[in-house]
Image (tube, helix red, strand yellow):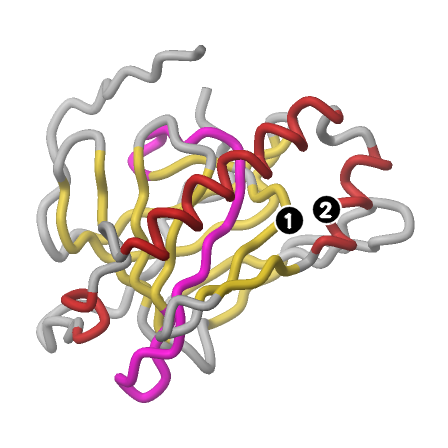
Amino acid sequence: MTVFQDNRERRWRRGEVIPIRHVQDGVVRFCEAVIVVEDHGDRLVTFAPLGGAMQWNSIDWETGAFGGIRPQRRHTTSALRFHQLGAQHMTTLFFVDGAFLCWYVDLQEPTRWAGGGVVTFDRSLDIVIGPDRTWRWKDEDHFSHIQRFGWITPRQAEELREEGLVVIEKAKAGLPPFGDEWTRFVPDPDWPMPELPADWSRAPA
């Protein structure tokens, strides 16, 4: 089991803007600017408001080719994200006009802190959990495709599903971050609109 060390020189402050980079083979494929809500060393809570800066990339699901990264602004939903150092998932609460919509779990590469922010890579298989904690898998077809592309091995795919099942049990039990307190989250009105740093495209070592 890989052990991830927290090698930041200092902790992030509440209200500070940091990037979330999705890095594949040394290339930043996606990036989003988020605001730090809470920093607990190995656990981090961030917020992505409507209008926040992103760099987005389309994928051809027949070939696995990326369409080319381009700037975008967050739309439709705001997102409260929970990151755990070394975890192979990220849990997000989505809000529409301030009202809680659902929990959304991305299964991904182990989370690490690097390059002044969060680094991971999404592995396509997701879990949608409603306010009543009923759940369903999402994008299982994309998950099959990335196995066909050779992006993950069958064993890695099995481990990700196992991780997802553990998260589902936590959600059903209402364990953090699936408690009701976060569904009433209100962002600080003084927080800035998050913008990406000039070096967002640099993949951290």
State the separation of the CA atoms marked 1 and 2.
5 Å
- Mark 2 — residue? 143
Q: Quadrant of residue 52?
A: bottom left
- Residue at the image point whose x is 47% and y is 72% from the top: 73
Tell me residue 198's x, y (percent): 39, 47
Q: Specify whether residue 108 is painted magenta.
A: yes
- Residue at the image point whose x is 71% and y is 58% from the top: 58
Three-letter residue code for mark 1: Ser
Which of the two discs, 1 and 2, labels the residue nearer the N terminus? 1
Three-letter residue code for mark 2: Phe
Tell me residue 138's x, y (percent): 63, 60
Q: Are marks 1 and 2 in contact (CB under 8 Å)?
A: yes
Residues rendered magenta in the picture: 94-117
> Which disc, if any, is residue 124?
1
Q: Is residue 50 left or right of residue 138?
A: left
Tell me residue 200's x, y (percent): 44, 44
Prevailing secondary structure class for the magenta stretch in the rendered image: strand
Q: Quadrant of residue 53?
A: bottom left
Residue found farthest to the right: 62
Q: Split into 4 quadrants, where in the image is the N terminus?
A: top left
**Tag 1's secondary structure?**
strand
**Tag 2's secondary structure?**
helix
